[in-house]
Amino acid sequence: MASSSSFLPSATRGVLSSSCRPAIRPRTMPPFLSGFQQVRPASQTRSKKAAPPKKKGGPKEFKQGNLDDLEQFALCDAMRYLRAFEVGREPASSKYEVHIRMKTRRDGPVIRNMLRFPHSVQTESRICVVCPPGTRIEKEARAAGAVLVGEQEVFDAVLAGKIEFDRCICHPDSLPALNKAGLGRILGPRGLMPSVKTGTVVEDVASRVEMLRGGTIYRERDAVIRLPIGQLAFSPEQLRDNLRVTIDQIKKDAAGLNDRITKEVYEVVLSSTNGPGFSLNGEFKTDNSPDVSALQGA
């Protein structure tokens, strides 16, 4: 006897037979591929803009302005304008400053040194000396004007927070004791930690104390050396003497570098604590400059 389904149209039989079949299981990813993320076709992914190529390096030398297009002044003329900017201010708090721009490479060594002016600019600095106690070095340091001398005495004062000095130098024999005391975390952030690079670890302690008391430490930053060069009451001759010593010393520093390094003075700018900068042309005065006697005194 024929089954009842044989009387149905073939299309109907197909529908019934498909509804009676077990549901098809969803396709599962093999276990060894379960940790991987499905990759979309290229047509479905968002297009990303390609990053612009990075520029290879910058200029090898610091860029300096063209002095031919710059107005420059004689020393006396620059002093006249700067004194006008400082009118009404406390004379003791204002100083002349010099900015020496160097023509140099960006990746080259920097100049750092100290000098002593013919005419003192700053008040006497308080100097601390770390040296073996009870020695000839200690006696010479005290005679030179150091306010704090010794080893353990200095360490105890610094650890107690009594840093009553402006500069600190160390004798090589006391350098191991200084490093063992662990004062770098205290003196380092203040710029007082002695080191060979800054010239504050020296054999001749007495002469360095005398130099630091009336001298100035300078360092090149971004091809510029900036330092105070005179009191506002200085005469033009006093300021000229200090300026000459400064430029001569910086030229010696540049000449003492590696033979393959070229570094030279490019521009000298004179300014004051509250005044602008005036580029100097190397002349002391001109026919239109005021009388020298009018450019001195507070």
Image (cartoon, grey):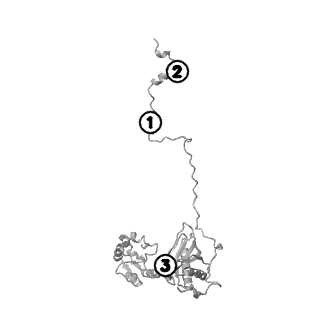
Q: Is residue 256 visible?
A: no
Report the residue at 53% width, 74% height from top: 225
- Camera-nearest residue between 174 and 115: 115
Determine contact: label 3, label 2, CB under 8 Å: no
Counting residues from the start of the chain, the first of labels 1 and 2 encountered is: 2
- Camera-nearest residue between 266 and 40: 40
Measured Cα–Cα span from mark 3 to mark 1:
77 Å
Residue pointed to by mark 3: 216
Estimate the x, y position of residue 77 in percent, counting from the top left: 61, 81
Q: Residues within 10 Å of mark 1 (few under 14, many from 20)?
A: few
Q: Residues within 10 Å of mark 3 (few under 14, many from 20)?
A: some
Left or right for 61, reference 133: right
Indicate the amino acid at tag 1.
Pro
Measured Cα–Cα span from mark 3 to mark 2:
106 Å
Q: Secondary structure at mark 3?
A: strand
Estimate the x, y position of residue 203 in percent, counting from the top left: 42, 78
Report the residue at 37% width, 81% height from top: 138
Q: Is residue 209 visible?
A: yes
Counting residues from the start of the chain, the first of labels 3 and 2 encountered is: 2
Residue pointed to by mark 1: 30
Find residue 51 and name its label: none
Estimate the x, y position of residue 101 in percent, counting from the top left: 57, 73
Report the residue at 34% width, 77% height from top: 153
Residue pointed to by mark 2: 11
Indicate the amino acid at tag 3.
Thr
- Camera-nearest residue between 253 and 66: 66
